[in-house]
Image (cartoon, rainbow, N blue to C red):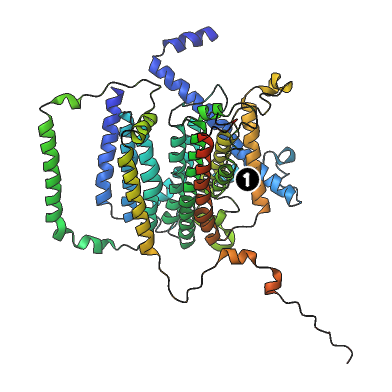
Amino acid sequence: MIQWFETAWSGLPPALQTTVTITLQIVAILVPLILSVAYLTYAERKIIGYIQNRIGPNRVGFKGLLQPFADVLKLLVKEIVVPAKASKFLFITAPILSIVPALATWAVIPVSPQFVLADINAGVLYVLALTSLGVYGIILAGWASNSKYALLGAMRSAAQIVAYEIAMGFALVGVLMAGGSLNLGAIIEAQSGSALHWFWLPLLPLFMIYFISGVAETNRAPFDVAEGESEIVAGFHVEYSGMAFAVFFLAEYANMILIAALTTSFFFGGWLSPFQSWPVIGDTFLGQSSFFWFALKLSFFLFCFLWFRATFPRYRYDQIMRLGWKVFIPVTIVWLMVEGLLVLFRVGPWFD
Amino acid sequence: MIESAIFYTFGAVLLGAGIGVITARNPVHSAMFLVLAFVTSAFIWMLLEAEFLAIVLVLVYVGAVMVLFLFVVMMLDVKIEQARAGFTRYAPLGIAVVLFIVAMLGIVVWDRTQEMNFLQAPARAAADYSNTEALGELLYTQYVYPFELAAVILLVAIVAAIALTMRRRPGLKVQDVGRQVVVRREDRVRLVNIESEKGE
């Protein structure tokens, strides 16, 4: 049987072999990603439930573990209602435009020391370019729905995302200066040493700004004015139902996982182990860099997303704008200057 | 083979999108066609191994400029009929401008086709060649003064734009966040102990 597969495989033309390999790799990234999205929704409801002294979903399956599938099934069988006078093509395209960048960005993220789908030189630029495309889904959804609430949500979201993207971009400039490369793998390698060598320490203000901007960028609480339920019903996706709504939902959670993965890679050493150069423990399997550490750090940041949602009240819209433009951008610029000095004087252990 | 197939496919999409920009009835659809045009030209640049420029085209034009464009276009209530009304009036001027541009391009191509070398593709760069690094090195060494000059001109434009849009109306009430934050309870609330009425 194995023999047969081997002969069949080597019989294929090389170009086809590459295509099949890459397709399988994409599946190997996407299937766990979508499963994590499903269980992230479950984790969110459970965690926020416990924070609010409730139990959360516990009826479907053992401890409610099948709840995400029940939700998906419910959304699948619901009707997609296209509002009258809506721009039908854009109405259907909008959810797709918001999910595609969230998934496509995973191509350059090194999930383990051995595996990254596309090890390209301009990785960080690719990430920036793709994450900046996600806003189209929201704007077009808001406009194409032909609804005032949706349009208001889209406008808020567009202004917010444009504002916070600048702060995020500046924070990444700091990462580039410290890592000396645009390749994500190389940036992670540059942080090797121990937990103190990771970039969170020399770039602490940039890390905080990056993560907070990430929360704002994904339209999560406390920055979720784009869908502020108490003001504009559900914002940009108020007219969406069924699977079209589910795709927006999926995109939001996939973006959260993406921001958590990027924060991990840029500031917390990606797949590097925190015990790397420790005397005894560093020699055991705990000192090895592996996917395990990446997943652990990523989960921590995802938990932070849920934690913020449960504990912070929603920002007022003008305060969000003020925070983005008048606080974050100046802070990043000042810290880039400081970092320039650190690099110039080779302050160790990061820049020597 | 595959490369030329990709080139012609994206070239066709690019042309179609370009035509879509000027023929779409709805300004938002026009803007989306323009986005499509930017993205496909980024792909074509990618074929030329200009990956830095390609990604920055998407990042800057699609990710920022067009978002603001859409933002404005959606807020405007553009009357299509009104916009179309002047079409025949302005058509001669438009056609003249297009002919002029085509003529200029034609002269350049005609002039250059005497020496065909520039039409040949440059040699392929090695896999570890970083386009971004090469550009950065040139910009910060050989072209550092033009680069800085361009930056200063952009800064002037930003300052001008802000200065033009900053208006201070008299009597406008603005929130001062600093003052909002330093406020203490004692400044705003006065607790009064009112004797309750006793006995009737």
Quadrant where the image shows the N terminus of chain A: top right
* Amino acid marked by disc 1: Phe
Looking at the image, which residue is at 89% across and 90% down?
B199
- Residue B93 image offset from top left, x and y in percent: 13, 55
Camera-side residue: A201 or A105?
Answer: A201
- Residue A324 image offset from top left, x and y in percent: 52, 53
Specify whether residue B174 is in view: yes
Mark 1 chain? A
Label 1 residue SS: helix
Looking at the image, which residue is at 53% across and 34% down?
A345
> Label 1: which residue?
A305
Residue that sits furthest to the right in the current view: B199
Camera-side residue: A64 or A211?
Answer: A211
Q: Residues within 10 Å of mark 1 (few under 14, many from 20)?
A: many
Can you tell which quarter of the image residue A207 is in?
Answer: top right
Camera-side residue: A51 or A270?
Answer: A270
